[in-house]
Amino acid sequence: MRMSMTGFAVLAFAVAGVAGPAAAQDDQPRPRIQRRAPLRLEVEPSRRLIRQCADTHVIENRFAGPTIVPRTTCWWALR
């Protein structure tokens, strides 16, 4: 019985020592993280430019095995 009371007392002091400074740190306000809006680019090409695209299918190695997926590549070209 005496051994369990000593262990309990040591545990109580250890918890009190650890919880004291941690509780004081939690009272301080945390700085807010401000998120910016994503960058957005607007392209206004001249009348001489058109957008051309090419579609292909490629094989990707995924967890379930090789999978065929569509891909699109685009570029600006003169008329």
Image (cartoon, rainbow, N blue to C red):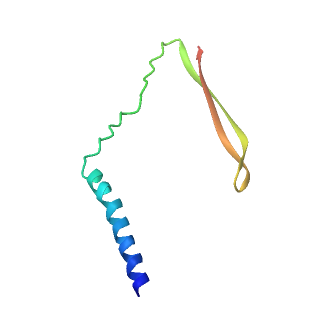
Residue in the foreground of this view, choosing between 77 and 32: 32
| Image position, residue 63 (x, y; %) | 69, 54
Would you place residue 76 above or below residue 60 in this image?
A: above
Residue in the foreground of this view, choosing between 10 and 78: 10
Would you place residue 62 above or below residue 55 in this image?
A: below
| Image position, residue 78 (x, y; %) | 59, 13
- In the picture, measured across the screen, residue 16 lies left or right of residue 64, that is left
Give the quarter of the figure containing the C terminus: top right
Residue occupying the far front of the picture: 2
Give the quarter of the figure containing the N terminus: bottom left
Q: Residue at x 34, y 67 (%)?
A: 13
Q: Give the quadrant of residue 70.
A: top right
- In the picture, measured across the screen, residue 55 lies left or right of residue 37, that is right
Q: Residue at x 29, y 59 (%)?
A: 20
| Image position, residue 14 (x, y; %) | 37, 65
Residue occupying the far bottom of the picture: 1
Residue in the foreground of this view, choosing between 10 and 21: 10
Q: Give the quadrant of residue 22.
A: bottom left
Q: Give the quadrant of residue 65.
A: bottom right
Would you place residue 55 above or below residue 8 in this image?
A: above
